[in-house]
Structures are given as C-alpha cells and as structure tokens.
Amino acid sequence: MPEGTGIEEGTMATTQVSARTETTDGRISVGVEDLAFRKLLGEPAWRGLAPAIHSRFGVKPLPGQTVEYAGRMTAVRASRLGQVFGHLCRLIGSPIAPYTGTDVAISVFVQRADDGDGVVWRREYFFPGRGKVVARSVKKVDGADSLLECFAGGFTMRMRVFAEGGSLHFLSTGYFVRLGRWRLPIPALLTPGQTHVIHADRGNGRFSFTMFVRHPLYGETFFQDGWFRAREA
C-alpha cells in the first residue's frame, strides 16, 4: 500500500461451520470452527502445524464464551524509544506494555468480538511493583491474504501469516488509521517498527509466544518472550 494514499476498506469475512474441538489442555469444548487461518496459510502449511495450534487458531469462541490462558513472560524488553511508544499507545488501548521486566505473570483472555467479526485478545501483565497493565486488540481477517490487528481509535496493523519450522508466524506489513471506510497509511518511521510474533507449541498443553519489534532506523524497540498454558475452567 503506497504511503500517503487512502484506500477504501472492503468487507472482512471468514468461513465458519459448527465444530467440536479439543482445547490445549485436553478438554473438549463446543465452538465455531473458523477456517480463516487455514485459508490464509493454505492447506499444506496448515496441516504441518501441531493439532494444538489448530485448536487455538481454528476455532472462534461462542458468543459469551471466554478462553483463558495463564503464563509467565520470561523477558519483557523495551528501548527508550519503545517505552515512549508504549506510553503514547495508552491512548489507543495500550496494545503493548510500556514497562520492562523478567518473570512477569500474564493472563490472556480470548473472546468473540461483539459484532461477531473478529476475535478479541486481552492480555493482562502483572509487573512487580506496578498496577495491572492491560493490552487489548481485535484480530480480523482482511480479504484472502492478510490479517488485521485492530486497536482503539481506528489504529490498525496489517499482518502476513505464515508457517515455518512447525510454528505460526505473524509479520506486520504496515500500519494505518481507519476513518470510516477509508484507510490512511502511517509512515514506517512514525511507528514502533515491524512486528514479528512467533507462536510455537511446546507440548503438554504449553505454547510459547515470542515477539520482536524493530524500528527501521533505531533497531529493536520491543522484545517479549514467554510461555502459556490453558487455564482450567
């Protein structure tokens, strides 16, 4: 998407069928099978992922249902520039924690968006000596080849989804502000940088989350690494 041009927003949709799926800790839950990630990746790449990853990204929660994960972030880093971005981003719902730490407790809550279009990911960080930090975003499919991560105020990150080494990867390809049906691109220099998230299954109901964010001029702005497990109902 060329910088400085507005692109009219199209319809975002996923193909869904009723499903019954196994959660990461072995429990069976009734949900709605969401074929969005399967279509984004393509059948061969999707089949190459662990069944536990299928259960996390191939099913959308039912209305009113919440899927919960608990874990620890072994490392949460932010450069000085990253911390500035982190505090500024509080204006759009704190999509990323502005603080740093090790062995940080974290809880994640996944729900269907109120309008049924997309899935809400709410992350609660518990940094020692600080209040709870809440990061919230909504993931939505954008056409046939990309995913949108949407924040408050219309701020949005477009992501390419791919599989590599048995893990699921999310790589940002640009940022924009959504105003009605229009998308106004944000120059890369005015963003925290390119985001790369890796979701890897670790067996026994556990998975890891690793995030790198690199600014085109100033290098690493954020890094997070940790593990999670589905919380018992």
Image: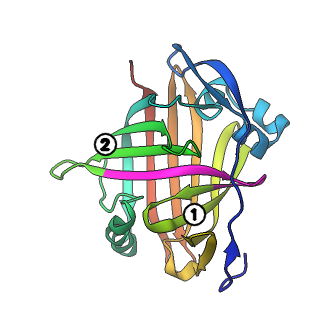
Closer to viewer: mark 1 or mark 2: 1
Residue at image x 44%, y 33%? 228
Residue 172: x %, y % from top left: 62, 62
Q: Decide which of tag 1 and tag 2 comes sooner along the chain.
A: 2
Please tell me whether residue 200 is drawn above or below residue 148 in the rendered image: above
Mostly what secondary structure, the magenta segment? strand
Task: Give the quarter of the figure containing the C terminus.
Answer: top left
Residue at image x 76%, y 35%? 46
Residue at image x 56%, y 56%? 149
Q: Is residue 140 magenta?
A: yes
Mark linked to residue 168 = none
Q: Indicate left or right for 94 with 219 as reference.
A: left
Classify residue 107 by image quadrant: top left
Q: Are marks 1 and 2 in contact (CB under 8 Å)?
A: no
Q: Residue furthest left?
A: 129
Classify residue 30 by image quadrant: top right
Tell me the kind of residue under disc 2: Asp
Q: Residue furthest right?
A: 44
Q: Indicate left or right for 164 with 137 as reference.
A: right
Colour mode? rainbow
**Label 1 residue SS:** strand
Residue 157: x %, y % from top left: 57, 63
Mark linked to residue 103 = 2
Q: Indicate left or right for 62 with 69 as reference.
A: right
Crowd tier of the residue under label 1, counting other residues whose Cα lies within 10 Å: few below 14, some 14–19, many 20 or above = many
Magenta region, residue range: 134-147
Please tell me whether residue 120 is drawn above or below residue 69 in the rendered image: below
Mark linked to residue 157 = 1
Residue 118 or 69: which is nearer the viewer?
118
